[in-house]
Image (cartoon, coloured by chain):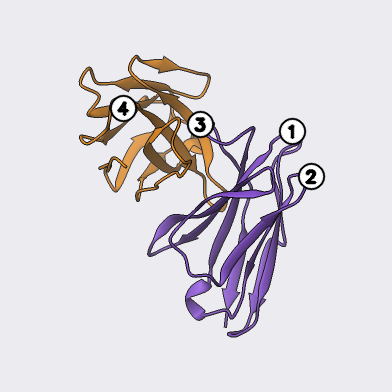
Chain colours: A orange, B purple
Amino acid sequence: DAKTTQPNSMESNEEEPVHLPCNHSTISGTDYIHWYRQLPSQGPEYVIHGLTSNVNNRMASLAIAEDRKSSTLILHRATLRDAAVYYCIPRRLDSNYQLIWGAGTKLIIKP
Amino acid sequence: KAGVTQTPRYLIKTRGQQVTLSCSPISGHRSVSWYQQTPGQGLQFLFEYFSETQRNKGNFPGRFSGRQFSNSRSEMNVSTLELGDSALYLCASSLVEGIETQYFGPGTRLLVL
């Protein structure tokens, strides 16, 4: 499984965009990139996933580098509710189904 | 649609005891995975069940076991509890195995004294 590198923590101001980076230089061609987040005292929550092209949903956007060795999760307008630990997880869709979790990035939102 | 539910939410046990945790997946979901989360090790995969069969297992000792029932509800059991088993145990469900989106429950926080 591909290894990931994420900043331990990031700070952002409320109502500003947030760009959360993830390096996954050993990713294979069939690994999707998944993002989950875990709010305080809750279980993780799916955010978004993609393979090659950029992806958007109601929660966030995912920008994937052309060489797929890195990706960026974009929160367009952070709110206090977005304060969480964000996990970037490469995973093959047809794999035997294990999500390998790193330490993630703790996102702090300042009012 | 109701989310993933886990019971109990909190549990205190003593070393040597055994414990059973329960997970009810989202209606229609047939795959259930279990994870252990500790401050030191983060989130670690325990096992995954689909159609009452264990499909995948993480690197945990045999004291950790699980099962899935015909209604997709799942239980995990830890026997001969150790202090290091204190953790948040998370259950996640998905429609079928191999699907990218997992939906997590709130977890059961287990404290072993």
User: Comparing marks 3 and 4, which lies closer to the viewer?
Assistant: 3
The residue carrying pointer 4 sits among few (fewer than 14), some (14 to 19) or many (20 or more) residues within 10 Å by Cα, namely some
Q: Position of residue B101 (x, y in %)?
A: 54, 32
Label pair 4/2, CB-CB below 8 angstroms: no
Q: Image quarter for residue B15?
A: bottom right
User: Comparing marks 2 and 3, which lies closer to the viewer?
Assistant: 2
User: Comparing marks 4 and 2, which lies closer to the viewer?
Assistant: 2
Which amino acid is tagged 3?
A: Glu
Residue labelled with disc 3: B100
Q: Image quarter for residue B6?
A: bottom right
Label pair 3/1, CB-CB below 8 angstroms: no
Residue labelled with disc 1: B28
Towards the viewer: A36 or B49: B49
Element assignment for label 4? strand
Residue at 54% x, 54% y is B47
Label pair 2/3, CB-CB below 8 angstroms: no
Residue at 28% x, 35% y is A22
Q: Is residue A89 above or below residue B68?
A: above
Q: What whole-number distance in Å separates the C-alpha atoms at marks 3 and 4?
A: 18 Å
Q: What whole-number distance in Å separates the C-alpha atoms at marks 2 and 3?
A: 22 Å
Q: Is residue B42 above or below residue B70?
A: below
Residue labelled with disc 2: B71
Residue labelled with disc 4: A72
Query: Mark 2 vs mark 3: same chain?
Result: yes
